[in-house]
Image (tube, rainbow, N blue to C red):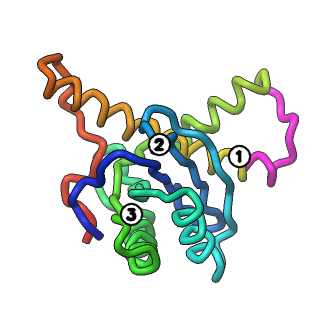
Amino acid sequence: MSPTPAGPGVRLAVDVGTVRVGVAASDPAGVLASPVETLPRNRGDLDRLRALVQERAAVEVLVGLPRTLAGRDGQSVVMAREYAAALAERIAPVPVTLVDERLTTVLAERQLQAAAGGGKRRGARARRAVVDQVAAVGILQSWLDSQAAGRRGRAGIPSPNAAAADPGGVA
């Protein structure tokens, strides 16, 4: 996994869970994140991600790093790092980057509840699959926005100091 930033192009984001993996993709200009699909965590999920990287000619894959609100690493962080390492082996030389994803699943749940008017119009299983995709969109859109803010900052426009990328890079 490489800390070297990739150039312009499609990025995929992955929200790794114990049961499912949510996937989102950016447009080639790196402006907008959109949901792609939810994969079951099984022996075929990494192969499907490799196929998505190839189909979309992705230049980078972002894997959400679910740190605690205090910025600490828990068991979910260990799982995400292991998943990112396994994915990096499958899709090399496309870089895999870990990005902070605190609260993305919670925000995704709230967005879906608001869109449904607070009601539960979907079955629980279908809803969870959509939540995983929306969480991946949140990871990717936050990263895209921080990159755009950084570009504006380098052009002389002040940008926020918050970096979405994992400062430790990917091990």
Q: Residue at x 63, y 29 (%)?
A: 111
Q: Residue at x 25, y 53 (%)?
A: 5
Q: Residue at x 59, y 40 (%)?
A: 34
Rendered-image quadrant of the N terminus: bottom left
Q: x, y (%) of residue 141?
A: 46, 37
Query: Earlier along the polypeptide chain: callout 2 or callout 1?
Result: 2
* 1 vs 3, front mark: 1
Q: x, y (%) of residue 167?
A: 20, 53
Label 3 SS: helix
Query: Earlier along the polypeptide chain: callout 2 or callout 3?
Result: 2
* 2 vs 1, front mark: 2
Residue for badge 3: 77
Residue for badge 1: 130
Q: Amino acid at mark 2?
A: Pro
Quadrant of res 142 = top left
Left or right: residue 15 versus residue 162 is: right
- Mark 2, residues whose alpha carbon is within 10 Å: few (<14), some, or many (≥20)? some
As drawn, the label of residue 28 is 2
Instruction: Give the distance between the C-alpha atoms of the residues marked 2 and 1, in whole angstroms.
Output: 23 Å
* 2 vs 3, front mark: 2
Left or right: residue 45 versus residue 82 is: right
Examine the rendered structure and indicate whether residue 52 appears above or below residue 149. below
Instruction: Give the distance between the C-alpha atoms of the residues marked 1 and 3, in whole angstroms.
Output: 22 Å
In the image, is residue 120 part of the stretch drawn in magenta? yes
Label 2 SS: loop
- Mark 3, residues whose alpha carbon is within 10 Å: few (<14), some, or many (≥20)? some
